[in-house]
Image: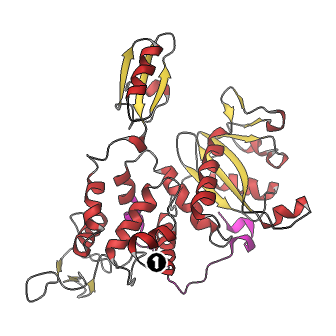
Amino acid sequence: MALGASFGWPAKLCCNRTILSSSEAYVKQILKSQAIIFYLTQSTGSDRFMIMTKVQNRSTKADQPIQDLPAACADEAVAVEFMEKHRWGKHPGCPRCGDMDVYKMVGRDGAREKYFRWRCRGCKSQYSVRTGTVFEDSRIPMRHWCFAFWRASTSKKGVSALEIHRQTGLSYKSCLFLLHRIRFAMAPVDGNPLTGTVEVDETYVGGKPRHSRDAREAWTTKAPVVAMVERGGRVRSFHVADVTAKTLKTAIRQNVDKRARIMTDEARTYRGIGREFAGGHHTVNHSKKEYARGDVSTNTVEGYFSIVKRGLNGIYHSVSKKHLHRYLAEFEFRYNGRELEDGERVVAAIQAADGKRLRYRDPVENIAAIEPAQLF
């Protein structure tokens, strides 16, 4: 068994640590001398300590996509080649017919054609790395798409359209266009139910109405969000119409495996759900200041909500209800890829854009007006 596995460490990280047989004071002295943050865990029955770096604080020197991105963000030809490499790899097949017998189109000077197009010998069609993706038919230069994918995939709390506007010189409207399509690409397509121990909680997103004297009116402008976190695994979050028992139980049934163990707070809306799951339903009573009882808690899902709210409040400031589901997809993508290196996460976002289109003229559904059963 990999050293560190008994402590519940992810397999990817079990090899990235140092074991010290020393006193805690000595370990703390080492920590102070480092320029990075460490997790510190004491082994049961001994004074041995495990030290491992956070994913966010590890060096990117060996992260090849991150090493390649600065050049891709500065030169259009390099940006196109970067996208081609990470979308297609060594097999740039035709996105229309799937034929692998394709070739690059070149000009009279032998250089690549102006729009970096390819031609398929099978169906005779022309295409580029943009074809069949969220950036198809976009006039935004590919180098700016590379920069936006980089920032959106590696910034823990997100990146604003205004920042992309300042860094690239694109109009604010174009930056909104660009980031919404990246969020659309990041939207999960994995329909596998959550397993193991699943924490469920709900929260409200949005500001308070101005000059209101009625405390109940403050909740009318807020958008309810429900999230389910698989401990040590994935998260799913939704903007829902309400937080009634019917809505929340429907969400749990459609996203959690029947063999799972459900953990929530003491809210009455969850009562009775445990009879439908083999692991039962366990609760903590927040009203009595009980936040953990043994391994029963909702701290993981509340930690996810804290990341979402810090992003919405600190980066985006204001998010409309009709676009909230896209922002949740963005936070969900980064959370589910938290154990990946930054470059791996960027590549995953680029590959997730394949086969997706979001046209500017397409109407954006107002999620709050949809029936709860249609949200999942």
**Majority SS type along the magenta span:** loop
The image shows residue 181, relative to residue 252, as above or below, that is: below
Residue occupying image coordinates x 72% and y 37%: 280
Q: Residue at x 39, y 55 (%)?
A: 345
Count of picture labels:
1
Magenta stretch holds residue 369: yes
* Location of residue 159 in the rendering, given as x and y in whole percent from the top left corner: 49, 62
- 151 in the magenta segment: no
Residue occupying the point 57% across, 67% down: 326
Q: Residues within 10 Å of mark 1 (few under 14, many from 20)?
A: some
Name the quarter where the C terminus is drawn: bottom right
Question: Which residue has dot 1 on it?
Answer: 357
Q: Residue furthest left?
A: 109
Please provide the residue range marked out in magenta: 348-376
In the image, is 316 to the left or to the right of 271? Answer: left
**Residue 367 position by quadrant:** bottom right
Q: Position of residue 81 (x, y in %)?
A: 23, 70
Q: Quadrant of residue 319?
A: bottom right
Give the side of residue 150 with respect to residue 256, left or right. left
**On screen, residue 37 above or below 96:** above
Tell me where residue 243 appears, x and y as whole percent: 78, 57
**Mark 1: amino acid:** Arg
Q: Is residue 259 visible?
A: no
